[in-house]
Amino acid sequence: MLNKKSKIFIIIIIAVIGLLTFLEASEPEPINWFPSYAKTDKIPLGTFVSYNMMKETFDEGKLKDVNQPPYEFLLDNDTINGTYFFVNGSIGFDDSELDRILNWVEKGNTLFVSAKSIGSNLLDTLLIDTDNLISLDDISTQPIVELTNKSLKTETPYHYDRDVQNPYFSEVDTMNTTVLGVTQLYNDTLQIKDPRLNYIKQSFGDGEILLHSFPEAFGNYFMLTDDNYKYTQNLLSYIDPTQQILWDNHYKSGKKFYSSPLFFLLQNRYLKWAYYILILGVLLFVIFEGKRKQRSIPIIEPLKNQTLAFTRTISAMYYEKEKHKEIVEKQNLLFLDYVHHDLRIPTNTLDEKTLLDISARSNNDLEDTKKLFRYFEELNRKRIITKEELIRLYDMINEFKNKSQQ
């Protein structure tokens, strides 16, 4: 049974766990600002709202989900036409994948990329360089954005009231680049005085490439703040609504599936605490129940091998009664058993080869080996064996075995 101190200790632990669970459950759910950009995520930087807005805005069936890597998709669907639409925190194609995408764009299609970090191979191909807006006078890095087209431009820029990284296109190929949108850090006034390019277009073959450096515009938080959704709608006005839009689900930071049940448990605060309490309960059970029921394991002495003692007793009995002949016979049998089991040599036939094997495996000279076996034969032929002959046999056997152990 548990003693009084153990019971008090368990009660205190249970009370602490209950209090922690209550405090955790009472706290408001923290806002998840993870930049997933996944169409199924309703967190601030998911794209649930913008995806469904596009689904409703464009003709039915024009928005198509692509779950494969672009290289594989375009390899399997090289005749498809439209706009390949990428939105994520970073987009980086490898060289072979970029070549396939650009070949597809050259045929009259459109590549749209909205990301804070765009692969250098794509930027180098288009002769574009990037930089980041840095606030020197204030620690705030909230951006304001607007489009340059007069028909799409509003009286005041759109404000994103979160401190974020603000990349922009610092150098472009002015001969082939059209500026579609600009940005600037918020400075207490909704007015862009020092515009930096954040939305550009370049022709590429018979197609075109649209690059945008403010993917938060497609996030749920931006879309649902004031009238910011209008900015996102106007961004999309540069996409041909009559062609299919291929929405990329491959280049997304958001997790598309749960790789393990434990990941699912730890994502939910209530399941997470239930899991922790279960583990703690199991540990307490092991500690206290193990202490109560564990018993010392008795040491059981192994059975002793009495063969040697029995042999010595019998030998002594024969020796005292001067039954030397019987002792020699027993010694002969024991020695043959030693050769068979210890030296691993059959003793059915003691020919020249067998004696040579016995000599080799026992580290004895062949002549000494033959001498021992001849002496066995000599004693076996005698009817009466003296004490001295018996002692000599004993000495020869011991000398033989000692050499075997060297």
Image (cartoon, grey):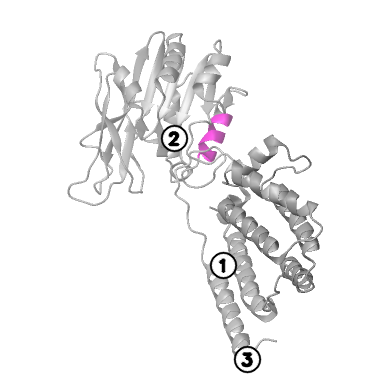
Determine which of the numbered discs, if any, sits on residue 4 in the image.
3
Mark 2 vs mark 3, foreground winner is: 3
Mark 1 vs mark 3, foreground winner is: 3
Q: Secondary structure at mark 2?
A: loop
Are the two marked residues, 2 and 1, in contact with CB atoms closer than 8 angstroms? no
Mark 1 and mark 3 lie on one chain; the one further toward the N terminus is: 3
- Magenta highlight range: 47-56
Residue 14 seen by the camera? yes
CA neighbours of label 2 inside 10 A, class few (<14), some (14 to 19), many (20+): many
Determine which of the numbered discs, if any, sits on residue 25 in the image.
1
Q: How far across and how far down the image is residue 321, in percent?
A: 80, 73
Mark 2 and mark 1 lie on one chain; the one further toward the N terminus is: 1
- The alpha-carbon separation of the residues under discs 2 and 3 comes to 60 Å
Mark 2 and mark 3 lie on one chain; the one further toward the N terminus is: 3
Q: Residue at x 25, y 13 (%)?
A: 175
Determine which of the numbered discs, if any, sits on residue 88 in the image.
2
132 w.r.t. 225: above or below: above
Is 324 left, or right, of 176 in this rendering? right
